Image (spheres, rainbow, N blue to C red):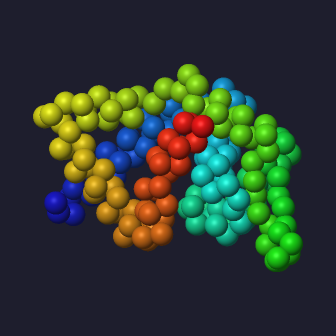
Amino acid sequence: MDESSLPYFICLTRGLYKAIEKDLNKSAQKLGLTLTELNFIWTIYFEEEATISRMSELTLLDSSTVTQVISRLKNKGLVTTIKKSEDHRYSYVKLTTQGAEKRKLSMIDNQNDVFELLKKDMGLPTEKENVQITLDYLEKINQLFHGDEYVNWLKRLPGKLNSDDMK
């Protein structure tokens, strides 16, 4: 790959992101949320309790943006903030019952065409290796730019979701 391939790479990744974003926006809008708000609900669900700085790390957004989104979610009754008795310096964000319900509802009638294609291709012996190589490379890129802690957090997400759905 040489310098002349950069526009091609940028357009391919942007096109993929836009396809994913389109489906996720539909899901969020059905729930009366923005895509960012839905992402926060899921992040808080996975963390259970998170500080603003932790939310900033996990959503890859700056603290001021995180504070604004948390404020909107509080106004909608979807999250609450608490201070722990052992350290009053930090506020922690938690889902309310209504927020937890929105998260569950976001999984119902949720169509993501890119994910469905990946699932289908993982079932094909001729494509399974290509999909796994792509996922491994995406992990490598995220590790380089966002660090081990971020990638390790991502790897734990399916396990949390599977264990909670079994309850």
Q: Can residue 142 be seen in this view?
A: yes
Place residue 139 in its image quadrant: bottom left
Furthest residue to the left? 126
Place residue 164 in its image quadrant: top right
At 40% from the left and 46% from the top, the residue drawn is 14
Furthest residue to the top? 109
At 69% from the left and 30% from the top, the residue drawn is 31
Q: How many labels does the image show?
A: 0
At 32% from the left and 63% from the top, the residue drawn is 140
Q: Can residue 72 be seen in this view?
A: no
Residue 11 shown left or right of residue 87 in the figure: left
Residue 51 shown left or right of residue 27 in the figure: right
At 63% from the left and 57% from the top, the residue drawn is 47
Place residue 137 in its image quadrant: bottom left
Residue 102 lies, with reference to residue 9, above or below; the image says: above
Residue 57 lies, with reference to residue 157, above or below; the image says: below
Q: Which of 148 and 97 is in front in this view?
A: 97
The quadrant the N terminus occupies is: bottom left
Residue 90 lies, with reference to residue 41, above or below; the image says: below
The percent coordinates of residue 103 (x first, y second) are: 65, 37
Q: Which of 83 and 138 is in front in this view?
A: 83
The percent coordinates of residue 45 (x first, y second) are: 65, 49
Q: Which of 158 and 55 is in front in this view?
A: 158
The percent coordinates of residue 160 (x first, y second) are: 53, 49
The quadrant the C terminus occupies is: top right
The percent coordinates of residue 124 (x first, y second) are: 19, 30
Residue 131 shown left or right of residue 28 in the figure: left
